[in-house]
Image (cartoon, grey):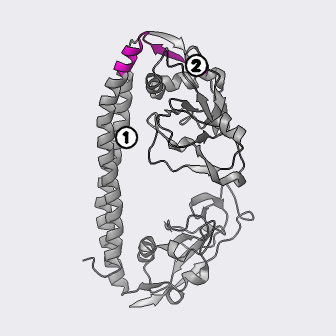
Amino acid sequence: MLKKWSDVLTIVSGKNQKSVADPNGRYPIYGSGGVIGYAGSYLCEAGTTIVGRKGTINNPIFVNKPFWNVDTAFGISPGDELHPKYLYYFCCSFNFKELDKSTTIPSLAKRDLLQIQMPVPSLSEQERIVSKIEELFSKLDASVAELQTAKEKLKVYRQAVLKEAFRNVGKKVFLKSLFCGTPQNGVYKPKSAYGKGTRILRIDGFYDGFVTSEYEYKRLSLSEEEIEKYSLNQFDLVINRVNSMPYLGKCALIRHIPETTVFESNIMRVRLNPDVVSPEYVTYFLASDEGKRELTKNAKQAVNQASINQMDVGNALIPIPGDIVLQEQIVSVIERYLSVCASIEQSIDISLQQAEALRQSILKQAFEGRLV
């Protein structure tokens, strides 16, 4: 039997947490994306599902203890006719984006949520459905964990390939001796400048030393002078100069620029002299654990972030064979091994996508009465 949410549950609107926030509090404070602090009191009972009111609206969270929700998160509290986990799994199956009427930040209205209809069988049947969902999800989670472990092993293998490639190779020189021109930090613009205009590269576009082909660029408005100053060319090396330590020194080589592209302020652009060094060779070394240690050995650390400057990058030591032909041979060997990694990882990613599709299929069957 289909019933409206208004008849079977209560929606608890969130409130500002300032008056109750307490780092030693017993109750978690939830926003639409998860825990953001702790409180001395609560708004929602245990067994409530969080659905984002604003921002992250399509990622329900089940909470098995009392909690405080802020004004960007609704607490969906089941009535006597609903099993708490049954309601949660229904929320996981429902596409809340269909109710989003905003033009900027995704948002939901309480009145629209209360009009949602859902199947409400007997509590015993709900318990059976929940049990079956969790049985299937447990098996699926085990498979996903194996795939994620395989991806982590590929990271270790990549580093082993790079370590072996640069073992006992040539003499070490300062990276600055290979520069062609002066390194350049990227452009900073306020959020209001973003929207239309010139493509801009951010650090999330880097992967394994190169810019990913499927990367989705943002755009921003720039003057002609700014475009000329911050444009990227083929074989430019870009290095993450400000970030938390795990990401500091992350680098990539620009191999293909189909249209004018600039780079953001926490990135440094380095141009290498192609007459003395292979840009791919340098990139692969800097992507290795040893290379990253060289780039970040003089990093300046502050709260939650660290930074390197142009001098730090220039003083990184690079093992360089004098012959560019030998450098290119080393690159060829590296790419032969890493191409195998890339192929395996692509297969893993496809399997992970299929696992997520299967998860949604299980939920769809559950709420169509076809999960036996």
Residue nearer the viewer, 225 or 146: 225
Amino acid bearing label 2: Phe
Above or below residue 59? Residue 347 is: above
Instruction: Give me the residue at 62% from left, 57% from top.
Output: 36
Task: Left or right? Give the position of 154 relative to 69.
Answer: left
Name the spot of residue 188 as percent of width and height, x first: 70, 42
Separation of marks 1 and 2 at Cα, in angstroms: 34 Å
Give the residue type at disc 1: Glu
> Horizontally, is 344 left or right of 252 in the view?
left
Residue 58's x, y, as percent?
50, 67
Instruction: Tell which of 365 and 88 is nearer to you.
Output: 365
Q: What stretch is highlighted in magenta?
A: 314-330
Q: Residues within 10 Å of mark 1 (few under 14, many from 20)?
A: few
The verdict on residue 283 being magenta is no
- Vertical side of 67 occupied by 127: above or below: below
Q: Quadrant of residue 18?
A: bottom right
Numbered disc total: 2
- Local SS, label 2: loop
Q: Nearer the viewer, mark 1 or mark 2?
A: 2
Q: Where is residue 289 in the image (x, y as percent from the top left)?
A: 46, 26
**What residue is disc 2 on?**
179
Asked if residue 14 is positioned above or below residue 321 in the image, the reply reads below
Give the residue number, with chain letter if any, for mark 1: 152
- Most extreme residue toward the left is 372
Quarter the N terminus occupies: bottom left
Q: Do labels 1 and 2 touch, CB within 8 Å?
A: no
User: Element at badge 1?
Assistant: helix
